[in-house]
Amino acid sequence: MQVSVETTSGLERKMTVSIPAENIDTESQKRLQQLARNVKLNGFRPGKVPFKVVKKRFGDSVRQEVIGELMQQYFYQAIVQEKVTPAGMPSVEPTKNEEGQDVEFVATFEVYPDVEPQSMKDVTIEQLTAEVTDEDLNDMLDTLRDQRATWTEVKRKAKEGDQVVIDFVGTMNGEEFAGGKAENHKLELGSGSMIPGFEDQLVDSKAGDDVEIKVTFPEDYQAEELAGKEAIFNTKVHSVNKKELPKVGELAEALGVEDGNINKMKEDVKANMQRELKNALTAKTKQQVMDALLEKHEVDVPKSAIDSEIENMKQQMIRQYGGNEDMAANLPGSMFEDQATRRVKLGLIIGGIIKAKEFKADDEAINNQLNEMASVYEQPEEVINWYKEDKSRLSQIEQLVLEQKVVDSVLAEASIDQKETTFKDVMNQEKG
């Protein structure tokens, strides 16, 4: 097969391929003969149309159909022969296409760059360490109790920590505005869920009160048309409710601890906190490693790969928040471009390191990863089997294992600066 490959610029390649006329003619002839046996034309009995008539009527279209299929076939044979890996779909165009002669076509495409792993010896990775203290555990138990609180109506003035059930209508210069109205809204005073000053003005109110609340929207408020402006909320208080927290023993039962054993509950909650802390610390270390890899490696990124990743991110957003294909088409690619570029770059760098260091996802490492992931579920064996029964799902685990090998190799080479921190600081950063 006659093939030539030209580097036009950066990662772009132009591949010229020839298709022998004999191959085109042979396949075209075969299809026309098949067509002659089945085609129906006025004036001829089925299967009795002369071959010359069939060729005159359908010859050009059949030939173009054959050329289209052979171009695809020869392109894939050519990239195997030349050992190039396209980063996306090629742009294919015939340059010579005359009957009875070889057809020549040009395929233009981008290739993935070769990535040479760089030394990480001069890199410093900050590795945070933390423990779950008794204070952290007690705070978590308080949070869990608070999440399961009930509310009881009281006949008194509201104070911070109470819940008020209210109707309100917001106005600016006497005019209502979008999003400024609600009925039977449940608001915990002191929660900070409303704009600054709103909740404070409901302290000391009671059921039946009409309260005029005057506030100023923050300058950085998300709705630009409201930012920095004054508003009045005419508010009706329907009820004042007091928070009732479950007892610790009741919390244990609610969490499914057998016999409501408080000590067992504390052990379980602490174990979960320790697992969350470990995962968060591991993620922070991995993030620093990834940042360091990006900084140390200059990589040209195929635009086609970025475009493909942008489409993947659009589809991921639609699956997460609900939507349809029309929504994907209307999402601007620019909002995903930076993150998509980062992902593709990291994928190329990690792939280059895996290839250069000949890392393999061995069975033991895969099983360890699966066991760790499945341990948070009630039926871990079912989760493990779910991954193992599907090759695409299992390949995700293999990729995680390989990524971790890359991270470990960087940590082994780089300098480590360990710093102590707290459970609260780590988890608050995770939320942020």
Image: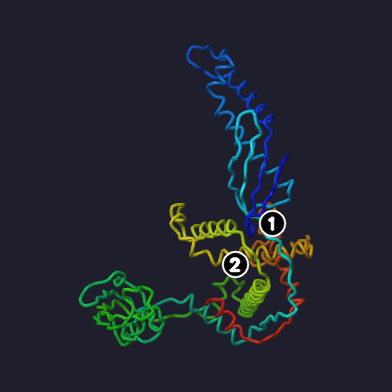
> In this orientation, which residue lies closer to the viewer: 268 or 412?
412
Residue 354's x, y, as percent? Answer: 74, 63
Asked which quadrant contains residue 210, the reply is bottom left
Q: Is residue 61 above or below residue 156?
A: above
* Distance (Cα) linking label 1 and label 2: 21 Å
The local crowd at label 2, few if under 14, some if 14 to 19, many if 20 or more residues have their Cα within 10 Å, is: some
Residue at 31% of width from left, 83% of height from top?
216
Q: Is residue 357 left or right of residue 11?
A: right
- How many labels, in total? 2
- Per the image, the residue denoted by label 1 is 395
> In this orientation, which residue lies closer to the viewer: 255 or 414?
414
> In this orientation, which residue lies closer to the viewer: 335 or 146?
335
Viewer-side label of 1, 2: 2
Residue 192's x, y, as percent? Answer: 41, 81
Q: Is residue 333 above or below residue 198?
A: above
Q: Is residue 345 visible?
A: yes
Mark 2 belongs to which amino acid? Arg
In terms of secondary structure, where does tag 2 sit?
Answer: helix
- Per the image, the residue denoted by label 2 is 342
Q: Is residue 221 left or right of residue 149?
A: left
For marks 1 and 2, the one nearer the N-term is 2
> In this orientation, which residue lies closer to the viewer: 209 or 256?
209
Q: Can residue 264 be seen in this view?
A: no
Mark 1 belongs to which amino acid? Ser
Point out the image quarter for the N terminus: top right
In terms of secondary structure, where does tag 1 sit?
Answer: helix
Residue at 59% of width from left, 84% of height from top?
136
Residue found at the far left of this picture:
174
Q: Is residue 107 above or below residue 160?
A: above
Residue 101's x, y, as percent? Answer: 65, 31
Residue at 62% of width from left, 25% of height from top?
31
